[in-house]
Image: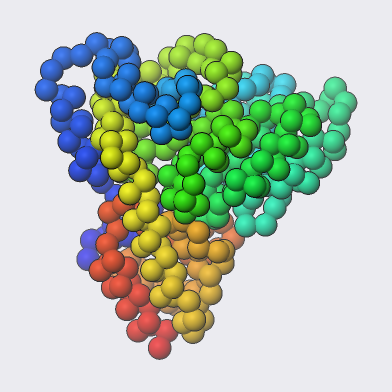
Amino acid sequence: MSQYEQFASDNYSGVCPPAWKAMEAANRMDEAAYGEDSWTQRAADGIRGVFDTDCDVFFVFNGTAANSLALASIGQSFHSVICHELAHIETDECGGPEYASNGAKLLLGQGTDGKLTPQSIEHLVTKRTDIHYPKPKALSLTQATEVGTIYTPEELRAIRATADQYNLNIHMDGARFANAVAALDVHPSEITWKAGVDVLCFSGTKNGLALGEAVVFFNKHLAEDFEWRCKQAGQLASKMRFISAPWCGLLEGDVWLQNARHANACAERLANGLAGLPGITLRYPRQVNGVFVEMPDPVQAALRAKGWRFYNFIGGSARLMCSWATTTERVDQFLSDVRELVA
């Protein structure tokens, strides 16, 4: 078995064939640089079609840049951003949002299963209102969350109501947004602009691309001068078509959604197979393509000795991730090894 065998991360998987084919097509002739090419226009229009609305679309290399630059565009250095204490922008981006905004502070909220609540948001906004406290300006919601749970349209609308009460903009970290759409079985608009999301960082990397995230501004006012922000941050690709063309492959025929549905289904198969095994318990509800499981340390060590790779995540549970490339055969092989070890 490969030393990099799944289920460590959906970042381990390669490029899905439609995206690879589109990149190959973009390589057949010269095109204008810096996003002035036909592929970038086509990809941006495709994203507008996905959400069924006019919006401003920008492409950057990775998720940390997408989140950090999007949040920097919402406020200023003396502002603050409210996020869940387990949010990726807090736990895994090395201070990127603070750096990009020249110091805007992250205020950490709470909520079960990795989700912010209106009550938690209100507590942080009203905790202090004096001039010595960084003024809350934005919310950041992770969809799906870092622990594999999802905000429903109803939950998002309730959060929007609280945001409106305190004049806050909403950023959505959509590293696994496709998986959330697939799990909820709703139109993408229902959990973005129709629910009051101002800007979405829509990930392609975790869903079949080599690299490339789309920053989608539904509130176009917030996108003012964003292209200059990207340039300054080293996120303007000169050969932009090699970021945007694979998006065309992902968007055509809803490949992005098919990939997410497949990854979710593999995770569901994995969770169902683990449920009820001796010494094995699920830490969080399995809703998208990640399974968070408590298992004895000797079992984890034995699985790694067999070549399986997975992370021990926030709080100590084992995180098992599925991707567009995960196979049911691989899921069943892993389950067989677990059953053998806990028998």
Q: In this view, does 232 lie above or below 261?
A: above
Quadrant, the N terminus: bottom left
Q: Position of residue 241 (x, y in %)?
A: 26, 22
Q: Which of 67 and 171 is in front in this view?
A: 171
Left or right side of 226 for 156: right
Q: Position of residue 331 (x, y in %)?
A: 32, 68
Q: In this view, does 34 lie above or below 203?
A: above
Say whether residue 65 is visible: no
Name of the residue lying farthest toward the left = 28
Left or right side of 168 for 15: left
Q: Where is residue 197 in the image (x, y as percent from the top left)?
A: 59, 33
Q: Residue drawn 15% across and 28% down?
A: 25
Q: Which of 88 and 305 is in front in this view?
A: 88
Quadrant, the C terminus: bottom left
Q: Residue drawn 74% across and 44% down?
A: 118
Name the image quarter holding residue 75.
top right
Q: Residue drawn 85% across and 38% down?
A: 127
Q: Where is residue 49 in the image (x, y as percent from the top left)?
A: 40, 29
Say whether residue 298 is visible: yes
Name the image quarter holding residue 205.
top left
